[in-house]
Amino acid sequence: MSADRLTVVVTRRLPDPVESRLRELFDAELRTDDRPMTREELIDAVGRADVLVPTITDQIDAGILARAGDRLKLIAHYGSGVDNLDVATARERGILVSNTPGVTTEDTADMAIALMLAVTRRIPEGLTVMQSDAWHGWAPNALLGGRIAGRRLGILGMGRIGRAVARRARVFGMHIHYHNRTPLQPPHVDDLEATYHDSLDHMLSRVDIVSINCPHTPSTFHLLNARRIGLLKPDAVVVNTSRGEVVDENALARALSAGAIAGAGLDVFEHGTEIHPQLRALPNVVLLPHMGSATREGRIEMGEKVIINIKTFADGHRPPDQVVPSML
């Protein structure tokens, strides 16, 4: 199939260089505003697209795929995680799925460290003091936080991003602990001096900061539940830059409100844009609007991967970043 004959429907506004390249290469239908498509708009899109380029805000389920007819052949996802896509149903219907793994690894790891520092050093509280003109000078006991050097970091999910977080944390003098489906093998673990915990419960009871870096799957839903949150130390901090559904948000809010743990830094949330009201109100919680991958470089590189996947498909080959159910 000739690339310039492919109708490529994009569901959200993408960086200008990416949109320009899509227009140049394909018959691209680009979004004119930046709100997510409604379900009705998605149904309309899959009916007229050869290639659909969705983002994490689009829930492409079996019901939507059933309306695709025979034309849709590739879902070139603009994102790494694909828990918003029904990959199994797509495969049954002969629709290939690709994603954009790896390009935002460093950006997301940076954000995890930034959240650790923001919570432990109470940076947002200091900013509030300065912006409200409430600072009256240095004081010995003002806004005392905790240091991260020498503390134990427990990483839940030691994939690309988890390892990138570990490398950064080592520079800060932290001791790395991790829970994964299997222990890391050389060369991935050689320079991390990381301690593997087969038992997640055991790791949680020992560490000072938890960084969640595993994907959302049926087996990781509420992996950090009320019981496991109860295993954490009173001075523990939870950081999540992965998927909100991995954490029982109600249980986390209760623990933070009761002072059972010290704080949390969250870039993702269990119910999307519906943020738990207790989390909004607590001074020991730092909330960010899912901006872990939000660098100009990263978002453009994501678009470049999307384009490579589409071009490779148009040339009659499987996309290099094809997703299959066995990978999930």
Image (cartoon, rainbow, N blue to C red):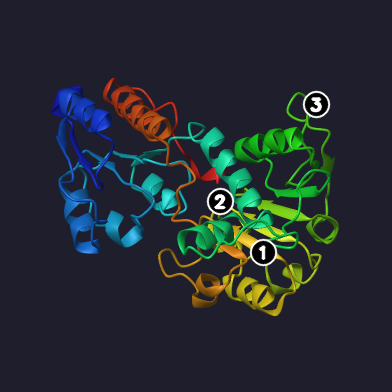
Question: Whole-Å distance between the Cαs marked 2 and 3?
Answer: 24 Å
In-front residue for pair 48/40 = 40
The type of residue carrying mark 1 is Gly
Residue in the image at 28% along x and 20% along y: 315
Q: On screen, 95 above or below 297? A: below
**Left or right, 111 with reference to 263:** left
Horizontal and vertical percent position of residue 211 = 67, 51
Q: Residues within 10 Å of mark 3 (few under 14, many from 20)?
A: few
The type of residue carrying mark 2 is Ser
Horizontal and vertical percent position of residue 154 = 76, 50
Work out whether mark 2 precedes mark 3 in sequence or the reverse, and give the earlier one. Answer: 3
The type of residue carrying mark 3 is Asp
- Residue 242 has which mark? 2
Q: Secondary structure at mark 1?
A: strand
- Residue 263 has which mark? 1
Q: On screen, 205 above or below 153? A: below
Residue in the image at 69% along x and 55% along y: 120
Question: Whole-Å distance between the Cαs marked 3 and 1?
Answer: 31 Å
- Residue 190 has which mark? 3
Q: Secondary structure at mark 2?
A: loop
- Residue 173 has which mark? none
